[in-house]
Image (spheres, rainbow, N blue to C red):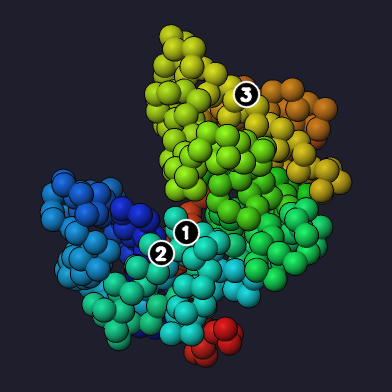
Amino acid sequence: MKSDSAILVVNSGSSSVKFALFAGEGGAQRRLISGALERLGLPGARFRARDEDAKILIDETRDIPNHIAALDLLLSNIEALAPHHQIHAVGHRVVHGGENCDCPLLVTPALEARLRELIPLAPLHLPHNLAGIMAVRVRRPDLPQVACFDTAFHHSLPRLARLTGLPRRFEKDGIRRYGFHGLSYEYVIGELRRRHGDDAANSRIVVAHLGNGASIAAIRGGASVDTSMGFSALGGLPMGTRSGDLDPGIVLHLLMGKGMTAEQVRDLLYEQSGLLGVSGLSRNMQELLARSDTVAAAAEAVDFFCYQARKHLAALTASLGGLDRLVFTGGIGANACEVRARICGGLGYLGIVLDETRNAAGETTISSSGGVVVVEAFPTNEELMIARHVHDVLAAQRPMVREA
């Protein structure tokens, strides 16, 4: 690609499109612009953009009825905001790639058709991911698009870690454990390799990606061994509004005993549960921490989250046969020192001992010098990971699409 070429990274959600514009080669890519189009189809839709120095470039209210309008608005403005760069490709975060998408793929009609078939596996995510792809195609059919899958990193899961306990006949319908947040885990492993070398990146690692969506993964030899999320982005840890692991008997009781519809249960589990449901106040961890001294339900929601995270973290060490390194990332993991301390409290038997001063100061390495396990905390960068993948796919100069 030319030195002035840029890659647009798009993350299309149900009512938002987050974006970032990157320029440069390979690992040296830098973020030029980032922002979001929010409240699509709702009153007060907003278009925000900042440059690499966090200077506000756009912050205005617009009528943005859908994803096509959002991408049209974005593509109409973004090259004017970066006049010395021209968009040459678009990379999309795609939550689910199914069993066959184990690497980033150039978007083709065959791939889009395959992803539409996977919508039942991720009904609240894939339709919006596909809407973003379609919107770019409508506005700029000349641009190559690359789909980067959150499930791809977990294709290395061992057979036993994929099983669900259901009869084997359901596997042919794609019902198995997949794992998510793979782009984040991939970035973290790359950062460990860059900072500390191959030995660190190939050691026994647990990464806790904690944010509004949250999961934990066990990684050995740079490959996923197990993870807290399974078939959907609903399982594992409690999240901002998602329940996390739930006795399936509860779901049956809600359907059969309480007479709730499938749609009502889906909304309950995805939109009304987790931190929001337990606290009755907010899905935002920062707000709950601020109110935990005065509101018992807020304190209990935080305690519940940390307890579940600690339990999953410890369980995942069993799949590794021990633990050498623990990394906290995501909005909560990288920034909430109190949450990190609560999760690690009582895990001294695993060799996890935090340095209180380092943790409170937000240093990258937060473990005690006397601890066996190295503990780190730093932000993830899924957008940069996508930009790198797009660069590599285009540099290969060959289609990376497998037959559906």
The x and y percentages for residue 271 are: 43, 40
Q: Are discs 2 and 1 less than 8 Å apart at CB?
A: yes
Residue 127 is marked as 2
Outermost residue to the bottom: 398
- Report the quarter where the C terminus lies: bottom right
Image point 47% across, 45% down: which residue? 261
Say if 104 sits above or below 364 in the image. Answer: below
Are dots 1 and 3 in contact, CB under 8 Å?
no
Judged left or right of residue 245, residue 9 is left
Identify residue for label 1: 123
Q: Disc 2 and disc 1: Cα gap in Å?
A: 7 Å
- Closer to viewer: mark 2 or mark 3: 2
Q: Percent x, y for residue 207?
A: 65, 46
Near-viewer residue (156 or 35): 156
Q: Residues within 10 Å of mark 2 (few under 14, many from 20)?
A: many
For the residue marked with disc 1, what is the amino acid? Pro
Viewer can see residue 82:
no
Distance from Cα at disc 2 to Cα at disc 3: 37 Å
Residue 35, above or below 307: below
User: What SS does tag 3 mark?
Assistant: helix
- Rendered location of residue 188, percent (x, y): 59, 53
Write down the residue under mark 3.
342
State the image quarter where residue 338 is shown: top right
Which numbered tag is attached to residue 354?
A: none
Q: Secondary structure at mark 1?
A: loop
The local secondary structure at tag 2 comes to: helix
On the image, which quarter does residue 37 sit in?
bottom left
